[in-house]
Image (tube, rainbow, N blue to C red):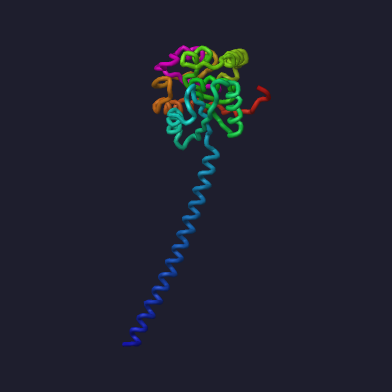
Amino acid sequence: KTNSRAETIHRDAAINHILQTRLCKINKCALIFEFSAMCYYIMYLQQHHQHMTKLLYVHGYNGSPYGSSYHHLKEACGDTYELHTIDYAPTQPKEAIRTIRQYVQEHGINVVIGASLGGFLTLQLSGLTRVVVNPCWDPAVELPKVGYTGPINEYVDILSSFLKTHNDEDRHLCTGCFADGDELLGTQYKAIFAKYFDKVYSISDGHKITAQSAVEIINVHLPETLHDKIVEFELPNGD
């Protein structure tokens, strides 16, 4: 009986050793598989990130880079577009335009989306694919109506320069989205915009970008805009 019990203990120990060895091998294989899968997923994310179309959002007067409009656009972008944003000083529009141009070049931005006053600044980025939402076409006229007391001469100069230098090659590169219910600017600038650019669309809601209008901008009008070849932006010399 003693020998039988010893044999049983030895046998059980041998079986446990075999099972533990196999389990160890299985766990190692599982860890290797999980590590390989994780590496593959990281590589996929990096490649997907590199090939995503990059958008830059330029907010309006009294807005902020990460305000509600940005978040509505961000939600609409999902995993399809990479949304950037930028701030600027409304009292220095020429410097703001230079800052936007510099950001576009440094971050490889493909499309600039500007709203209201940000739309006016975005209009000045000739040669780059862009979308303007309820653009403030004439800030020198419109800004004082909403309490702006800063200098307006630069805005006058910028608009004058735009009207003199605009060319037909830029007509298809800028898309205008105008809300029929824009309570701030109305629809007065829609017809003026259409004199200079080919793509003019109506969107829902009012002046400010909402969840609904963001979906229309990102999922409907942006893809239509991107049917044309995206033009890579080169920073011009001087101002």
Q: Between residues 72 and 9, which one lies in front from this camera angle? A: 72
Residue lying furthest left? 1
Left or right of residue 104: residue 32: left
Of residues 148 and 61, the one nearer the viewer is: 148
Of 65 and 168, which appears nearest the observer? 65
Figure check: 185 above or below 232? above
- Rendering coords of residue 137 (x, y %): 52, 15
Q: Is residue 136 magenta?
A: no
Residue 221 x/y as whole percent: 46, 25
Quadrant position of the C terminus in the picture: top right
Total numbered badges shown on the rendered structure: 0
- Provide residue 7's location: percent of width, then percent of height: 37, 83
Q: Outermost residue toward the front?
A: 149
In this picture, residue 229 sits left or right of residue 37: right
Q: Residue at x 47, y 62 (%)?
A: 28
The N terminus is located in which quarter?
Answer: bottom left
User: How far from the left and from the top, in percent, is residue 145?
Assistant: 47, 13
Answer whether residue 182 is magenta in the image. Answer: yes
Q: In this view of the protein, which residue sits in the foreground, 22 or 164? A: 164
Left or right of 71 in this view: 106: right
- Looking at the rendering, the stretch of residues picked out in magenta corresponds to 172-193
Q: Residue at x 44, y 63 (%)?
A: 26
Position of 74 relative to 134 (above/below): below
Residue 116 lies left or right of residue 3; in this view the side is: right
User: Residue drawn at (53%, 30%), measured in percent from left and top?
Assistant: 86
